[in-house]
Amino acid sequence: MVSEVQATRLLLLGGTREARELAEKLANDRRWAVISSLAGRTREPEALTGQVRVGGFGGVAGLETYLAQQDIGIVVDATHPFAQAISLNARTAAEKMELPYLRLCRPPWQPGESDRWLNAANLEQAAEMVAPGCKVLLTIGRQELGPFLQRSDIRIVARMIEEPQKPVPSNAELILARPPFRVSDELALLRDKEIDVLVTKNAGGSSVEAKLEAARELGVDVIMIARPGDAPAVDAQSVDELMQLLQRHHAT
């Protein structure tokens, strides 16, 4: 048995289902002493196993300081595929500190033959692609609504976990809900709200994929926002793959 003193201190940048699963697995492995870090954007995040810190680091310099103070031996980035800033900062800080950096990121969704996808490079382009008079379902998070709320010529249904800090205009309706969602519920939502277009980020994963199945069944157009193009390279696409990489790092 490996003693607690020998455990490698691991900073796990989280906020995703994969990060929670990874924290649970590592909690039972005495080779690792894990600190899970959350950005703090969600006021009531789901419970995490083990030690947790909440809040930003203050850029690359602040993260370097934290890594040194906590005697971190390895950085695992399991943040959301669209959390570009923290991923770039984490990779840069780890490189400057000469620490291993591993990025876990679920694979993106791929369209099927019957899907009606329209690809958008970013939020602004996605908002421009919605035709006047359409009723759109937004599943992009509360902090990304701006470009769409400027469109007074469309009707909006925006689903998110928590309410946005700023009021929304009269042509927008909010739905507060936390995934996962069932296909039957997504079908009912698209029908009841008479949705013409679904707008979502290509986050991947199964917990929110049901909306794509529902859109496919009903023939609803989907505006799919692409992932950031300059994010750090992905080292693992699943928790099991990441665990294998950690096994190799510990053995070296």
Image: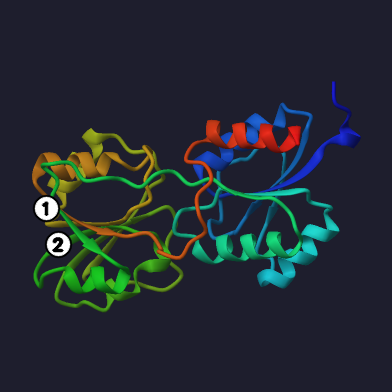
**Residue 120 against residue 36 in the figure, above or below:** below
Which of the image's four quarters has the C terminus?
top right
Contact between marks 2 and 1 (CB within 8 A): the answer is yes
Q: Which residue sits furthest top?
A: 1
Q: Which mark is residue 194?
A: 1
- Report the side of 195 relative to 210 (left or right): left
x and y percentages locating residue 206 in the rendered image: 36, 37
Q: Secondary structure at mark 1?
A: loop
Q: Nearer the viewer, residue 249 or 143?
A: 249
Q: Residue furthest front?
A: 252
The three-letter code of the residue at mark 1 reads Glu
> Which residue in the structure is indicated by mark 2?
135
Dot 2 or dot 1: first in sequence order is 2
Image coordinates for residue 103, horizontal then vertical, percent: 56, 49
Residue 13 versus residue 145 in the image, above or below: above
| 75 over 83 or under it: above or below | above
Instruction: Say which quadrant the N terminus sits in.
Output: top right
